[in-house]
Image: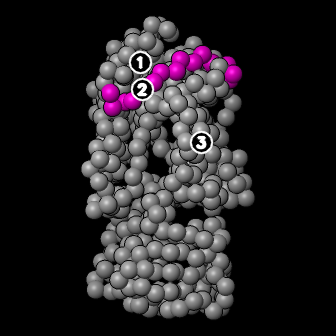
Amino acid sequence: MINSGKLAGRTLFITGASRGIGKEIALKAARDGANIVVAAKTAEPHPKLPGTIFSAAEEIEKAGGKAFPCVVDVRDENQVRSAVEAAVAKFGGIDIVVNNASAISLTNTPDTDMKRYDLMHNINTRGTFLVSKVCLPYLQKSNHAHILNLSPPLSMLPKWFGPNVAYTMAKYGMSMCVLGMAEEFRDQGIAVNALWPRTAIHTAAIEMLTGPDSAKWSRKPEIMADAAYAILSRDPKEATGQFFIDDEVLESVGVTDLTDYACFRENADALMVDFFVEEKGAPAGGAAVASNAKASVSGGDGIPQLFQKIEALLSPEIVSKTQAVYQFNVSGAEQGTWFLDLKNGSGSCGAGAPPTAADATMDMNSEHFLDMFSGKLKATPAYMSGKLKISGDFQKSLRLEKVMKALQSKL
């Protein structure tokens, strides 16, 4: 998306701006000639992750902006206040706050230690509240005041909570700040909104968690930067309290071809959907479908019974749309090898290795396997948290999630 120059001279306070999405938003605004406060913890190079506040500041200056690197741990009130005061002294005020800093742990309740729980809540929810609160007096003086939280749309459906309740609570805390502050500051002309991606976004941090193959089914962080730019360029009175999705924002400003945002252009139509949003065009009522499927699968049924039900639902139409053979190496209480052939004839499935070579092989625990087929567990968080390991053709593995959605209402 082409820069319009609307952020020229504006001052943005961006948390977590040393790398990833935060840095891309900073660079986009810098091309307008904006002032960027790079508020992040990384002053010394991370052993596994590239980028520091100083290297980010250098890139921002080269892009045409003015940069002010500040060492900020958003959990530390004194550091936040000092950074804000120093930024105001340097640039004369603050117009825009981007709450991007976040901690993630896609773990279930037994596997979430309280140190990690506290980290997520202190950075995501408390940090967002604190930074917004400290910047508020300066936002009130701006004629272009925005707060943008990188957090998901609020939804109380159980499926968003079940796989990783601690992380969901922490991210939803950021979203609740949007809901509350938008109403609280509405009459002051301060827009408070959220932005979240439709698909997985490839960053160095995600690659460290999931491996380099994650790029195959992800978009570049530039899509989030362009969407954020479109939101932050608007008059604050135009929209507040909104939960924006990146592709919808871009479509609203006339950007309809998103192919170039895919890390692999050939996979632009086969990307992994983010685990806090529905696939685009998905029908309403997904909660009821997932609930019915869960009841059917979990009501005393195990993996053999599940595959019997799947076999009865296979059809040439499903085979023609999928054209892939899957092998499941299941561990845990129902250990074994299973296959699903959606490539040959009318399809087949059952115990053992597939009759022809598998296009994609998936390794997971039997409990997680049943949860995934019932709709309780989506493939993206399962993969990112290590509950699901995939080898083989990634693009074909993504097709299985669509097949499961189609079957869940019938299982």
**Mark 2 or mark 1: which comes first in sequence?**
2
Q: Residues within 10 Å of mark 1 (few under 14, many from 20)?
A: many
Q: Report how far apart the C-alphas of labels 2 and 3 lie in the structure.
A: 22 Å
Left or right side of 79 for 51? right
Q: Residues within 10 Å of mark 2 (few under 14, many from 20)?
A: many
Residue type, mark 3 in image:
Pro
**Mark 1 or mark 3: which comes first in sequence?**
1
Left or right side of 135 for 238? right
Q: Report how far apart the C-alphas of labels 1 and 3 lie in the structure.
A: 26 Å
Q: Which residue is mark 1?
A: 83
Q: Is residue 347 visible?
A: no
Residue type, mark 1 in image:
Ala
Q: Compared with residue 99, is residue 30 higher up or lower down, i.e. above or below?
A: above
x%, y% of residue 258? 66, 47
Q: What is the quadrant of residue 178 in the picture?
A: top left
**Mark 2 or mark 3: which comes first in sequence?**
2
Q: Which residue is mark 2?
A: 72
Numbered disc 1: secondary structure? helix
Q: Which residues are magenta?
A: 62-76
Q: Which residue is mark 3?
A: 221
x%, y% of residue 390? 56, 69
Q: On the rendered image, what quadrant is the C terminus found in?
A: bottom left
